[in-house]
Image (cartoon, rainbow, N blue to C red):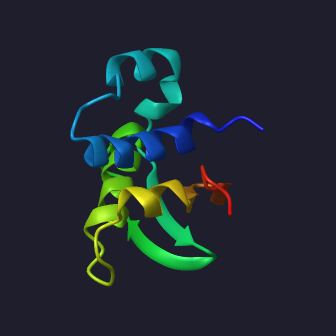
Amino acid sequence: MSRSVLLQLARDSIQEVLEAKRTIDKPALLNEHPLLNEKIATTINIYIEEELRGSFTSKQATKSLLEDIIHNAKMSAFQDKNFTPLTTSEYLSCEIELLLNTPDGVMSEKDPAILKD
């Protein structure tokens, strides 16, 4: 199964920090996926072995979906006060859950770990 654009964006956002280099081509993504321009609040949850490892939620839909996912992925991985920052090995074995707070209700999507036990 292929990874959705939204989950790939969340993964790439975390990977940018771990690798200390910018790799996300925002203009290309916005051009290819106009939905990313919409203002939609998100929640990003990170799990390791089905245990919550980080989480961050937008209080309101003030950013584009693109910017919201990037920001929330980085915050959940590295700024959640309840956890230490995510390490590379944890990143490779974590699941990422994306929740979209839409007018029609909450939509949820989960991305499995890159490396499986």
The residue depicted at 55 percent of the width and 70 percent of the height is 47
Query: Closer to the camera, 87 or 57?
Result: 87
Residue 39 rendering spot, x and y as whole percentages = 41, 43
Pick the residue in front: 14 or 93.
Answer: 93
Residue in view at x 47 percent, y 45 percent: 11
Quadrant in which the C terminus appears: bottom right
The front one of 74 and 32 is: 74
Q: Residue at x 45, y 49 (%)?
A: 40
Vertical position of residue 98 compared to residue 52: above or below: above
Total residue callouts? 0
What quarter of the picture does the N terminus occupy?
Answer: top right
Whether residue 60 is visible here, answered yes or no, is: no
* Residue 8 placement (x, y as % from top left): 53, 39
* Res 70 → quadrant: top left
Furthest toward the bottom, the residue is 82
| Position in image of residue 99 (x %, y %) | 56, 60
Q: Is residue 6 left or right of residue 26?
A: right
Residue 54 in percent (x, y) is at 41, 72
Residue extending farthest right: 1
Please indicate, yes or no, whether residue 85 appears anywhere in the rendered image.
Answer: yes
Q: For this view, does 24 lie left or right of residue 107?
A: left
When asked about the image quadrant of residue 5, the answer is top right
What residue lies at 34% left-to-right and 18% top-to-bottom?
27
